[in-house]
Amino acid sequence: FGILFLLFSEGLEVTSARIQRLANYVPLGLAQISLTAAVLSLGILSAPEFLERFLPLDAGLINIHNPVEALVLALAGTLSTSAFVFPVLKEKEWEDEKSGEAATSILLLQDLAVAPLLVLLPFVAGQGVGGAGNVDVGNNYSAIAFLTLKATLGFGSIIYFGSSMLGKVFNLVAKAKSSETFVALCLLVSVGMGTIAKELGLTDTAGAFAAGVLLANTNYRAQVQADILPFKGILLGIFFMDAGSSFDLNLVMNEFPTVITGVVSLILLKAGTVFCATKVPQWLEPNRLPEKDAVKLSLLLAGGGEFAFVVLAVAERLNVLPMDLGGLLTAIVLITMAFTPLLGDLADRLSDGLNATINNESDVIKMNENGIMEEPSLIADDAVVVCGYGEVGENVLKVLGENVALVHKSDLLPKIAAFDTDPFLIDKILVPKKDTVVLFGDGGNPEVLRSSGITNPSAIYVSYQDHGNVLSATSRLRNAFDKAPIFARSQTRFEAQVLKAAGAT
């Protein structure tokens, strides 16, 4: 479930404009999958005998001469880890760079390729509908065609009807003003769409991502992101614990030279192949990545992926791979996944060096060819925040709007943002004055502000009527933004003293 919420959260970031940008890297994704599978297949078939001359490797395990086994292993190794790459992209703020968008596009393409790969595995292994060694080609083609039709038309229909139904359901829940019900609905949508996608022949993570995309262009996107964040972290932790439990330490120690050789070989081959994939002819790949982004992408995707475990498990059930080899490969994939954050750091250093020597891109603000800012946020990162849009909040916003020049960092994004959970705001964004905006969401939740793009608020005004809500918001916002001045509403001197102790300015 942790992977589901990770992909659901990533889907929430994919607005209509970003979908178009991600689609630009589909040719690169196809090149990565095909080239990496081919290179790894050749390496598996030819490299072990050469390496045995210099390293004490286990020839009984790694000498593979069956092309089917080599292809299955190569396809498993081609997949990269969403669970480790997406947090690295977020931590290093690469999500909206070309390398981040290319990585997201390729990972999603790999995700979508898992389901047909699992369908094709019995056919490739000669154990299709007709039985082992007696493949009924017609039945296999019919099964593949049926599953493809079911996945495309069935899931396409779910997305089409879900786009209208989800909005109505969230509107109904928001009107109830129950935060618990809203959280429950977020969990139901992510898990439910994942389950539906799995029943239709796709991966559950593809369904969760699609659910996030459906909600990405709604006004409650930021609130949804904030609500699922604790669950995502906990369940991702459980996923990593489960993955770690399949790590056979005794096997790794007994086959240590073989494991280390496999880890280094997988990382080097994948990184080199991905980098080469960024250099295919211009007519095949119109959106060529600059050198620094190509380096970032190749290192980020160099490790193994969590879906490799699924592919290896299916291959073992089909008797394509011996059990000991499956355990060895699982250990290699796990180790390369764990190296992903370190590879991200290495990519950061290498790309900085390339950037200093090759590029002069010193502009922080990105402009497109029409001179319009390409900005993932709807709001300036140093905007003034107003929590609550009741009578007091509206008056605060009005006064601030008349003095908007006090906030000067960004000239193109709103500099003042008010947040309220009034259902009236669910399907609309208010713009009372120039440079001001009113959005749906709990402004007292720091994650809602961050999800909206506000990372360093110039000031925060808490205007709720209920003192308990004011106190809670003040305390949470002070812990999150220790340098921002916070002005909180109080109706008595005692309330003012309590709020000041909680962090109000």
Image: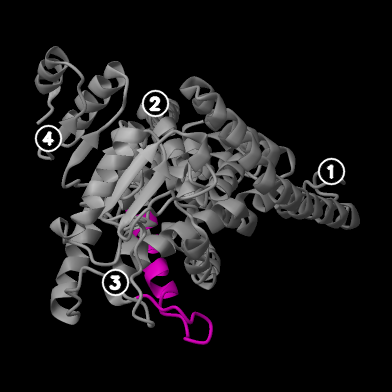
Numbered tag placed on residue 366 in the rendering: 3
Q: Within 10 Å of the Cα at label 3, are there few (<14), some (14-19), or many (20+) other Cα atoms?
A: few
The range drawn in magenta is 264-289
Front residue of this view, candidates 101 and 227: 227
Q: Between tags 2 and 1, which lies in front?
A: 2
Magenta residue check for 271: yes
Q: Within 10 Å of the Cα at label 1, are there few (<14), some (14-19), or many (20+) other Cα atoms?
A: few
State the CA–CA distance, disc 2 to disc 1.
Answer: 42 Å
Point out residue 505 in the picture as x, y percentages from the top left corner.
9, 31
Point out residue 419 in the picture as x, y percentages from the top left corner.
36, 40
Q: Earlier in the sequence, mark 4 or mark 1?
A: 1
Numbered tag placed on residue 131 in the rendering: 1
Would you say residue 321 is visible in this rendering?
Answer: no
Q: Earlier in the sequence, mark 3 or mark 4?
A: 3
Q: How many marks?
A: 4
Q: Is residue 315 left or right of residue 201?
A: left
Residue type, mark 2 in image: Ile
Q: Which residue is mark 4?
A: 482
Q: Between tags 2 and 4, which lies in front?
A: 4
Q: Earlier in the sequence, mark 2 or mark 4?
A: 2
Secondary structure beneath disc 3? Answer: loop
State the CA–CA distance, disc 2 to disc 3.
Answer: 35 Å
Point out residue 98 in the picture as x, y percentages from the top left corner.
36, 68
State the CA–CA distance, disc 2 to disc 4.
Answer: 26 Å
Q: Earlier in the sequence, mark 3 or mark 1?
A: 1
State the CA–CA distance, disc 4 to disc 1.
Answer: 66 Å
Front residue of this view, candidates 423 and 346: 423
